Image: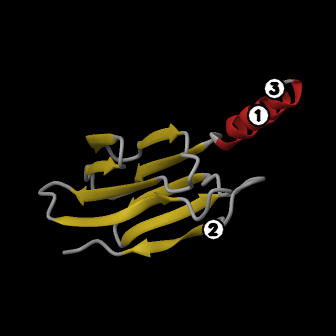
Amino acid sequence: MKNFSIFLFVCSLCMLGHVSGSGIKIANELKFKKLLWMRCYSKNDVLGPKIIPIGQQFENYFGTNFWGTTRFMCTLRQGPNYRHYQNFTAFKLFSHSDHGGVWDWRAREDGIYLKKEGGKHIRNAVNMHKAFDLIY
C-alpha cells in the first residue's frame, strides 16, 4: 500500500507540472483607430465575442489536457465594417509532453503575426513572423 501511495503522489506531481502556463494573447496593432473583433473556442470553452480597441490586447491562460490535444480556434475581424477577417488555429499542442506556452497574436494592417514564447517544456518556440493575411 505504501508503494501505491508513493506512485499516486509522483503521478499527481507530474499532473500539476503539466497544467502550467499555456495561453493565447491577441493584440490590436491596427492603424486608423480600427477595432478588432475576436471570438475563440475550444472543445470546452468559448472566448468572446469581444471587441479589442487599438493598442489593447486580450489574454487568456488555461491548463492543457493530459492527452495533448488542447486546441483553440479563433476568428479575427477588422473594423469598422468587419468585412476583413481570418479564421485560424490560435493554440495547438503537438504531443502530451508539449505544454504549449503562450501564443502571442498581433493583428496588423498587412496581416496577423505570431510569436510563440518558449520555456523549459515548450516545443516549437518561434520569433514574431507573419502567419496569415486578412481575407478581403
- Label 1: state its secondary structure: helix
- Could you tell me if the residues under marks 3 and 2 are in contact, i.e. CB atoms within 8 Å? no
Looking at the picture, how far across and down is residue 77, in whole percent?
23, 58
Looking at the picture, how far across and down is residue 60, in whole percent?
46, 39
Which image quadrant for residue 128? bottom right
In the displayed structure, does residue 133 sit left or right of residue 119?
left
Per the model, the C-alpha gap separating discs 1 and 3 is 12 Å
- Of callouts 1 and 3, the N-terminal one: 3
- Of callouts 2 and 1, the N-terminal one: 1
The three-letter amino acid code for the residue at tag 2 is: Asn
Per the model, the C-alpha gap separating discs 3 and 2 is 43 Å
The three-letter amino acid code for the residue at tag 1 is: Leu
Callout 3: 10 Å neighbours few (<14), some, many (20+)? Answer: few
Q: Which residue is mark 1?
A: 13
Above or below 13: residue 39 = below
Looking at the picture, how far across and down is residue 25, in whole percent?
48, 48
**Viewport quadrant of the C terminus:** bottom left
- Label 3: state its secondary structure: helix
